[in-house]
Every structure is written in C-alpha cells, then in structure tokens.
Amino acid sequence: MTNQRLFRLNEQFLREITGILRNDVRDPRVRGVVVTAVAVTPDLWMARVYVRTNHVDKEAREAMEGLNTASSFIRSKLGSRLHIRRIPELRFLEDEIPDQVNRIEEILQDIKKENDTESLD
C-alpha cells in the first residue's frame, strides 16, 4: 500500500472514529476522550488509535476500558461507513507524546537556567 493512501486512511479513520465516539457511543466512561492520531498497518490488520483523556488515574483507566469495550461496536460502525476491503482490529492507546514534549521543555528550561546562572558568575 502506498504511503499516500495509508496517510489518507489514517486521516479518514481519525475523523470517523472521532464522530462515532462523539455521536454513537453511549458509554459515559468515554466522554471527554479525544482521538489524536490513528496508525493503520499497511495490511489493514490493525489500527492503533491514540487518545487523550482529560481524566486522571482511575478515571483514565476506566475511559480506556470503555474504549476497549466499545471497540467491536466502533468497528461495525466503521464497516458501514467506509468501503474498504477489511476493517482493522482497533487498539486504543493513551497518547503520551504531549507528556514527553512537556518533559523535554522542562529539561530545556532547566538547562537554560543553569546556563544563565553560569554566565552571571
């Protein structure tokens, strides 16, 4: 599968899953869940769905459980909306990139502070 087609599929899956979560899934545990990215394998066997929740600890775990419980329902909705040969298995994963970015920014700020204090000496 070409990279451009895979990119378009990822974007289409992101839009469709977001719409399904917003309009069709009635599980209260998945309220406030935001789909940040989707990565479909080239053979359409699996799709990793990266999500962010505005919940903390226990509620975030419950939201992930709710997503995993609703995955077969979401797949069936995707099957009726998309006209592709195979609807991949959905794996919901928490998107940790924003946390990593924040950590890197903190480290860079600390280095900058150290450099500023050393230049004053």
Image (cartoon, rainbow, N blue to C red):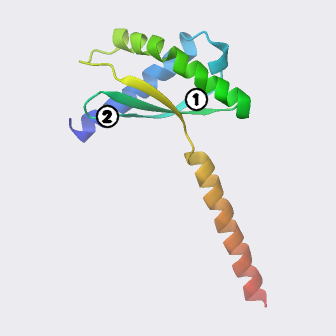
- Look at the picture and state if 6 lies above or below 108: above
97 sits left or right of 60 in the view: left
- Look at the picture and state if 40 lies above or below 103: above
Residue at image location 50% in from the left, 18% down from the top: 19
SS assignment at label 1: strand
SS assignment at label 2: loop
75 sits left or right of 25 in the view: left
44 sits left or right of 24 in the view: left
The image shows residue 9 at horizontal and vertical percentages of 33, 29
Residue at image location 32% in from the left, 19% down from the top: 87
* Image-quadrant location for residue 77: top left
Residue at image location 63% in from the left, 24% down from the top: 63
Which is more foreground, mark 1 or mark 2?
2
**Disc assigned to residue 34:** 1
Residue at image location 26% in from the left, 38% down from the top: 4
Name which residue type carries label 2: Thr
Q: Which of marks 1 and 2 is nearer the N terminus?
A: 1
**Disc assigned to residue 41:** 2
The image shows residue 25 at horizontal and vertical percentages of 56, 11
Q: Pointer 1: residues within 10 angstroms few (<14), some, or many (20+)?
A: some
> Which image quarter holds the C terminus?
bottom right
> Which image quarter holds the N terminus?
top left
Name which residue type carries label 1: Val
